[in-house]
Amino acid sequence: MKKYFLVISFFLYAFSLQAQYATLYPTHWFTGMHWNKVQIILRGQDTDFSKGKPSIQYPGVQLVGVHHFENGKYLALDIKIDPTAKPGSVQIEIKNAGITHIIEWPLHARREGRGTRFAKGVSSADFVYLLMPDRFSNGDLSNDHFTDLRDTSCDRKELLLHHGGDLKGVTNHLDYLQELGITTLWMTPVNENDMPLEKEPSGMLSGYHGYWFTDQYKIDKRYGGDIAYKKLIESAHDRGMKIIQDAVYNHIGNEHWMYRDAPSPDWINQWPIYTGSNHKEETVFDVNGSQKDKKRMLDGWFVPHLPDVNQRNPFVANYLIQYAIWATEEYGIDGWRVDTYKYCDEAFENRINDALIKEYPNITVFGEAWTSSVVGSAYFTRNNMDLPFKHNLLGVTDFPISFAIIDALNQNYGWSSGVNRLHATLAQDILYKNPLNNCIFLDNHDMDRFYSVVGEDMDKYKQGIGLLLTLRGIPQLYYGTEILMKNYKNPSDAMVRLDFPGGFSGDPANKFLSSGRTQLENEAFDFVKTLAGFRKKSTALQTGKTMQYLPSEGLYVYFRYDSRQTIMCVLNTSDKEKEIKLTDYAERTNGFRSGKDVISGAVISEKYTLAPKKISIIELSK
């Protein structure tokens, strides 16, 4: 018996060594993919790893190329997967120093329901909810602390540390989101962030927000890992909801192997001394600009602990493209939001977008292009401008519209201020191929909260929500805005990323329930819910055309319309009551004699009055 035990122990030990011989990226692939020429990065344990001679014997799978790097721990294998290949375990054999190592590389069947169950894309018919998992709800207390991570913190009393929110907590509250009228969930990144605390002006900061990747191929175990992520996505899809995954192509956390143990130095944009980006997007498209400024914009690091990734390196480009395809197939997501899009290599961005759309024709990608001008915003997406380089991105996060909405609500009426700023911004839609693909918003995780920005004025709050849900584009609501969560980014971003009340054990009130909300919070919630519910059935608000009229003394009138429906939106930003006559807007109202306020249900005639700081959203009828 002892002899058998020793033999079994020996084989288990040998297998454990075999399993640790190399780590593979991507971890596995799928049959029947358009992207059937896969480049596998193999990472071994020592610098003799690359001396091995790889081979593959699997029906329909060919090894067509082997690449070596400056760092001997790595090999890259070019694999061609024929349409005849069947799911199974591809054995990669590596002979090194007289020893044969077998590495298993699974080949899975494709996920069913492409374009119907998943990869459906997000459109202007949707209503997106942005949340930060760590700050939304803690559904599983067992994953709050891990001693094998560089940051073991989890303390809700410290704003800059992890708080314990997770993916099960999000899954637990899908009912709440559906009641609000949400169709699509966008979460800040859920990938592994095994980073230590980083010193920032406000103190020692954890990577609770998710943007410090250390391994794209793992879902952070503090969120519940792969199992919790797949459960959330399946639960959302069962309800007809969609999931957007947040991506970062521009940078990684400085504990990522691509930086700490890179195959070669050119995987990261290197500088003689630390050089940060100038953050000036104008340098990218300025026909009069210098290459020096453009290089610093694109290759400069975002901050010292986030190395800037070199997407011009073909191995890096393949790594990022393959992950995007792999994650879409593996998890069944519906679309992508790309962080820091304007900082990335432009040719690479077009490549990855093309690859995703070829694999998933209905999938959508919108990029974060934090710009101050419409020209800047339009440049990074499909546009009507005659330019040397043309981006193929479907849409952007529309910062110009966001800024214009805030100005419309907070500034006095003037030649180029107040509602005239909003009118002028929308007038520049001529630059976009399709502005309906832009994501519009009042605030997000990097901005002061909307309710605070408008001075905690309920009238302005409702005007902003009214604009968000009636203007063209894909509306996005930041978590808690519906219950009047507030704050400025002072002293840190964490102030606008507070925990959702009721999502954590011991919270004094549960704002997920109407009984836990104040009267004013319920008023805000119900306003969003009512308008979102109407929008869900309104073809004019979802995909209709826009016609706007020049503002007059703080009064701004615009229409959303199609062949089936006409919606008249009136924003009174002045301190005086305004009389509205349908005949003043005959170009769009001709033939209509009355209408119904979609919020109050009140019927209006051809002439009505609108109180100061109010918005009316009228479905016209004949």
Image: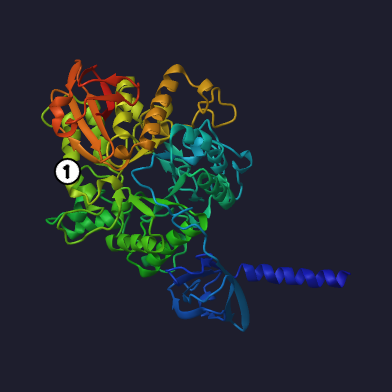
Question: Do we see residue 255 in this rendering?
Answer: yes
- Mark 1 residue crowding within 10 angstroms, few (<14) / some (14–19) / many (20+): some
Question: Residue 438 sits in which quadrant?
Answer: top left
User: From this viewpoint, which residue is outermost toward the bottom?
Assistant: 98
| In this view, 393 is above or below 135 | below
- Quadrant the C terminus occupies: top left
Kindly identify the residue that appears in the image at 45 percent across and 81 percent down.
Answer: 64
Q: What colour scheme does the image use?
A: rainbow
Mark 1 sits on what residue? 428
| In this view, 514 is above or below 165 | above
**Dot 1 lies on which element?**
helix
Question: Residue 591 sits in which quadrant?
Answer: top left
Kindly identify the residue that appears in the image at 36 percent across and 53 percent down.
Answer: 364
Residue 365 at x, y percent in the picture: 36, 53
Residue 10 at x, y percent in the picture: 76, 71
Question: Do we see residue 271 in this rendering?
Answer: no
Task: Look at label 1 and name its amino acid.
Answer: Gln
Kindly identify the residue that appears in the image at 18 percent across and 18 percent down.
Answer: 578
Q: Identify which residue, 302 or 442, lies in the foreground.
A: 442
Residue 498 at x, y percent in the picture: 46, 32
- Quadrant the N terminus occupies: bottom right
Residue 469 at x, y percent in the picture: 33, 34
